[in-house]
Amino acid sequence: MTALGDVLTWLRCPLCHQPFDLVDSSLVCPSKHTYDVARQGYVNLLGRGAPANADTAEMVAARDRFLSAGHYQSITDAVAAAVPHAHRLVDVGAGPGHHLAGVLTQLSGARGLAVDVSVPACRRAARTHPRMASVVADTWAGLPMADGCVDAVLCIFAPRNPAEFARILSDDGVVVVVLPQPDHLAELRRSHALMDVGTAKLEKLVRASGDQLQLVSTTMVSRDLELTQQESTDLVAMGPNAFHATTTVPASRVRLSVACLTLKKKLN
């Protein structure tokens, strides 16, 4: 529970927006709203059941296997390079917390919070790194966090809420967003009729963030991946395609192609 205590001042009650105290194994606000800390170390601040599209335990396990093999290490490295001086980081839509853990490993003394709407994801994230806490919450409903409480917001292949990102970000902090490009995993998408990436994602993000955040830099990350049958199957099974495709995927060669965007808060 040490990691959760380290980020306690960042958290706010989702009902009354007051700060928490850690009382025994529960978070308690001045209005006595109480949230028990699970034995694995995460706390559920969602206040309702997870949505139907939340990652399942099987999806989380597939993602953990795939990411642990190092295929997306170049993404982790690009994100870490964008936040070299951050001490307080939150990864929104963190899944099992692999990328945040990798960034924390490269930033001595930094602390992190993994936020995801999936209970299985947060359960695993809570055990991923000693300086990382984990909270179940919904980005769209509003993050249960204090204004200006973090130096960096990470959003890697996850839903984006620019207004909330700007609210919790310190004035000199940054938001780092990783977006798939049109040719990302194109080989698998063509051969297995997977969900399309969509076009002009970068431009849409910049437009949607215009009132709160401004783009300061973009780093393109691309490489070819040689995947075994298990790794190819896990790659499909770890994301939203898992709801649409359940077949075993043969060994494959695919292209990793993403944009890593760094944005800063617009100040009045």
Image: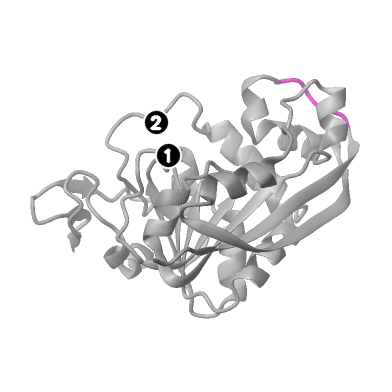
At 32% across and 56% down in the image, what residue appears?
Answer: 145
In the image: residue 88, left or right of residue 15: right
Front residue of this view, candidates 248 and 154 = 154
In the image: residue 161, left or right of residue 82: left
For the view shown, which residue lies furthest in the front direction? 268
At 56% across and 52% down in the image, what residue appears?
Answer: 155
At 69% across and 57% down in the image, what residue appears?
Answer: 260
Report which quarter residue 28 is drawn in: bottom left
- Judge the density around disc 1: few (<14), some (14-19), many (≥20) Cα neighbours within 10 Å: many
Image position of 196 with respect to 215: above or below: above
**Which residue in the structure is indicated by mark 2?**
50
Q: Is residue 14 at all visible to an observer of this figure?
A: yes
- Quarter of the image with the N terminus is bottom left
Magenta segment main secondary structure: loop
Per the rendered image, the range of residues in magenta is: 246-250
**Which residue in the structure is indicated by mark 1?**
119
